[in-house]
Image (tube, grey):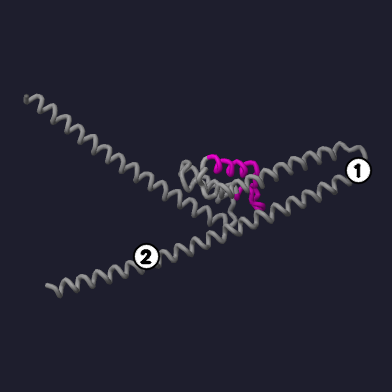
């Protein structure tokens, strides 16, 4: 009889110990995830500042780090979206349309519920069209090289140059519009942050005032 009670007590102790261990591990995981999220948010903020400053290589590196930190979770979609924009920026000396298109496609594939998915689809279409036109231009240039007469070759060269200039101008206009929109969004977010801090400070002052009133009432009641 005593042995049964001892065994029962041991089982209860083991259950309690396991439960406590689960709580400890859960708290540790939550703290780690929260720390990673804060680190990812800081990376995104740094990347936004670098992009506005024109440091495209630095901005791209920070966005890539943020995307790795979030591991497919929000706001990793914004990191991928910004990577796509940086890689397609007309002023970026390291511009890479193929990599840019890959970023937008990854966003669409990995974040089907993202608010940026529709816009990413538009940009993916734009970049894909640019790549298709580049391929056609390459084909035209190859055809030019095969022309036998100088007159025909000169005419085709002029037409190809005109087509390139038109494509380039359209692309630059579209990308500059997007960059200006990004800058405006960053400024608006900074302004919202300032207003939020002011609101929180005012609420704290009101709370302290209410506490002092309560203390005064309690003191008079005594």
Q: Residue furthest left?
A: 1
Residue position for label 2:
200
Q: Which range of residues does the magenta coloring cover?
A: 85-109
The crowding category of the residue bearing disc 2, from other C-alpha atoms within 10 Å (few below 14, some 14 to 19, many at least 20), is: few
User: In this orientation, does residue 62 appear?
Assistant: no
Q: Quadrant of the C terminus?
A: bottom left
User: How far from the left and from the top, in percent, is residue 172?
Assistant: 69, 54
User: How far from the left and from the top, in percent, is residue 8?
Assistant: 14, 29
Q: Nearer the viewer, mark 2 or mark 1?
A: 2
The residue sitting at 25% across, 37% down in the picture is 21
Task: Give 137 or 57, whichever is nearer the viewer.
Answer: 137
The crowding category of the residue bearing disc 1, from other C-alpha atoms within 10 Å (few below 14, some 14 to 19, many at least 20), is: few
The residue sitting at 81% across, 41% down in the picture is 141
Residue position for label 1:
152
Q: Quadrant of the N terminus?
A: top left
Is mark 2 in CB contact (under 8 Å) with mark 1?
no
| Numbered marks: total | 2
The residue sitting at 70% across, 52% down in the picture is 171
Q: Is residue 140 left or right of residue 45?
A: right
Q: CA distance from mark 2 to mark 1?
A: 72 Å
Q: Is residue 12 left or right of residue 194?
A: left
Task: Give 57 or 78, whichever is nearer the viewer.
Answer: 78
The residue sitting at 79% across, 49% down in the picture is 163
Residue 90 covered by magenta stretch? yes
Q: Earlier in the sequence, mark 2 or mark 1?
A: 1
Q: Is residue 116 left or right of residue 141?
A: left
Q: Which quadrant of the figure has residue 217? A: bottom left
User: How far from the left and from the top, in percent, is residue 219?
Assistant: 15, 73
Q: Secondary structure at mark 2?
A: helix
User: How far from the left and from the top, in percent, is residue 206?
Assistant: 31, 70
User: In this orientation, does residue 132 appear?
Assistant: yes
Q: Is residue 87 left or right of residue 77?
A: right
């Amino acid at each position: 009889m005593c042995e049964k009670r001892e065994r029962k007590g041991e089982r209860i102790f083991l259950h309690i110990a396991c439960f406590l261990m689960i709580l400890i591990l859960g708290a540790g995981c939550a703290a780690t995830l929260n720390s990673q999220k804060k680190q990812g948010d800081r990376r995104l903020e740094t990347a936004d500042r670098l992009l506005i400053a024109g440091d495209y290589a630095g901005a791209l590196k920070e966005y890539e780090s943020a995307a790795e930190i979030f591991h497919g979770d929000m706001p990793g979609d914004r990191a991928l979206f910004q990577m796509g924009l940086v890689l397609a920026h007309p002023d970026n000396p390291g511009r890479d349309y193929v990599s840019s298109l890959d970023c937008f496609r990854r966003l669409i594939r990995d974040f089907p519920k993202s608010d940026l998915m529709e816009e990413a689809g538009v940009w993916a279409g734009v970049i894909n069209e640019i790549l298709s036109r580049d391929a056609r231009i390459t084909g035209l240039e190859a055809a030019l090289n095969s022309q036998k007469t100088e007159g025909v070759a000169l005419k085709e060269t002029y037409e190809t140059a005109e087509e390139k200039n038109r494509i380039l101008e359209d692309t630059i206009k579209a990308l500059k519009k997007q960059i200006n929109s990004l800058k405006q969004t960053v400024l608006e977010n900074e302004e919202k942050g300032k207003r939020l801090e002011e609101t929180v400070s005012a609420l704290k002052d009101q709370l302290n005032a209410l506490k002092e009133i309560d203390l005064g009432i309690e003191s008079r009641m005594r």
